[in-house]
Image (spheres, rainbow, N blue to C red):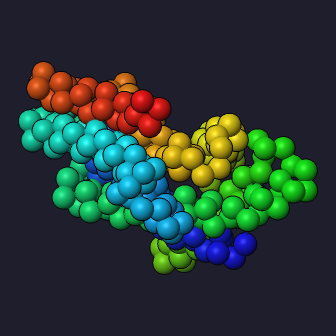
Amino acid sequence: MWKTMGYGVLWGIGGLTFGLSMRYLGIALGQSISLGTCSAFGTIIPALMEGTNLFKGKGLILTIAVAIALTGIAIIGYAGSLRAKNMPEAERKAAIKDFALGKGLLVALLAGVMSACFSLGLNAGQPIADAAATMGAAGLFITLPATLLVTFGGFLTNASYCLYQNIKNKTITDYIRVPKNILINNLLFCALAGGLWYSQFFGLGVGKSFFKEGTVIMVFSWSILMSLNVTFSNVWGIILKEWKGVGRKTWTILIIGLIILIFSTFVINF
């Protein structure tokens, strides 16, 4: 239980830097780099901890699938660098106010490595899931206790950092001075964001309940989740006009990267 929660605390650091990566790189590129790194580390490290040989049998298939996913993410990242290079400064600032490619890439990589601790936390909480199963819990819900512990660890990290910033900037009283309508509005949208965000891990647990324990697809399920996150974050980036004004070459590279990324989620079955 404590190990699962401890990974959640480390994952919380990834959450803090994850927000900064989108601030400096935008939704599309920020999520691509952060979640790509998270996908690789969150898939490979648990497999290594279980003693899987990544260059033989099931391990080799897993390595190939992760490599394809990372290739797609790298291509998307290259498209992002072309966008940064070719977009006029005015349009770049209009789309992403604080755009900073170098700083953003470093923060995004750190966010990805630390965010992978969520997968490690779920892996560490497997005995809890097994215990829930022996007590009669439905297969759809046995991963939820471990998910609760990981997210609680992340809450501790984020709450501590927020309070530190409040004390440092003397802004604790802002919680009671803000107009009631703004406070309620913020609380409702934060709750909605949290509920939607959490649903991905509930969906992950539901999906894994259909896989046999120890299969390659079970191990790769984390990478599938992250790859789809990257895919749809780029769709949102397009909708929010983060790619407005780029040339045909950049669009072509972006689409190729997305196709490869989507292909990586099915390659194990092939």
Name the residue at the right extreme: 135
Q: Which residue is drawn at 62% across and 59% down?
A: 122
Observer able to see residue 115: no
Q: Residue at x 19, y 25 (%)?
A: 251
Q: Which of 231 and 12 is in front in this view?
A: 231
Q: Residue at x 68, y 56 (%)?
A: 147
Name the residue at the front extreme: 57
In the displayed structure, does residue 205 sit left or right of residue 71?
right
Residue 227: x %, y % from top left: 42, 40
Residue 229: x %, y % from top left: 45, 39
The image quadrant that residue 50 belongs to is bottom right
Q: Nearer the viewer, residue 18 or 52?
A: 52
Residue 114, relative to residue 169: is it above or below? above
Residue 2: x %, y % from top left: 69, 76
Q: Residue at x 42, y 62 (%)?
A: 53
The image quadrant that residue 238 belongs to is top left
In the displayed structure, does residue 259 sit left or right of residue 80?
right
In the displayed structure, does residue 216 sit left or right of residue 151?
left
Residue 109, relative to residue 171: is it above or below? above
Residue 121: x %, y % from top left: 60, 64
In the displayed structure, does residue 263 sit left or right of residue 8?
left
Residue 137, relative to residue 234: is it above or below? below
In the picture, the quarter occupied by the C terminus is top left
In the picture, the quarter occupied by the N terminus is bottom right
Q: How many labels does the image show?
A: 0
